Amino acid sequence: MNERPKKMEREKTQAVMIDMQERLLPAMERTEEICEKTEMLLRGLRILEVPLIVTQQYTRGLGQTEERLREAAGTEACVEKLSFSCFPEPDFREALEAHPERNAVLLFGVETHVCVLQTALDLLATGREVFVVCDCVDSRRGSDREIALRRLEAAGAFLTTAESALFELLGQAGSDTFKKISKLVK
């Protein structure tokens, strides 16, 4: 049995933001809170130069990625999908495999009990380490979110928060990068 890792490493981690779209987010239970935390996380990931994959579910019906999150991500590129899990989409797998040295995936988005859950389970099945950012995931109902997080943890995913993930990826203080991350989370 593989030993569970102690922490994420910046050079071995990539991030995936799932379906944070303009017509889907208003239906979530904690929209403003998750958008605020996700914006902070995205800005921090850019500072840390952690590669990011952005997905959109059925863009024609659910719209684009929410504008401030798209800006914080620093990219207009996204993987279009119809499947709930990101994994069946060839463009997603291609983006994921563009960084073969990065076996850890920091996962966040909506909905926790559908697209986040199914993507995480598929990633775990490939042997990747999955870290789910609990304050950057949501569902329409809190009970669905909570049960999904319990299931994810039982399946082997690690639960974290945006601030914890940024400092874990940073690793140490005493640098300009540390100052930027510290300013961001305050």
Image (tube, rainbow, N blue to C red):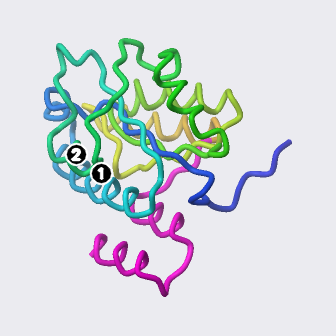
Residue in the image at 59% along x and 25% along y: 122
Mark 1 or 2: in front is 2
Residue in the image at 34% along x and 75% along y: 180
Position of residue 57 measured from the top left corner of the image (x, y, whole percent): 30, 20
Q: Residue furthest right?
A: 1
Position of residue 140 measured from the top left corner of the image (x, y, whole percent): 25, 31
Instruction: Examine the rendered structure and indicate whether residue 35 appears above or below residue 185.
Output: above
Q: Which residue is mark 1?
A: 38
- Magenta stretch prevailing secondary structure: helix
Along the viewing direction, whichever of 143 and 182 lies nearer the viewer: 182
Q: Which residue is mark 2?
A: 69
How many marks the image carries: the answer is 2
Position of residue 115 measured from the top left corner of the image (x, y, whole percent): 41, 25
Quarter of the image for residue 81 reads top left
Q: In the image, 35: left or right of 110?
A: left
Give whichever of discs 1 and 2 has the lower sequence position. Answer: 1
Secondary structure, mark 1, is helix
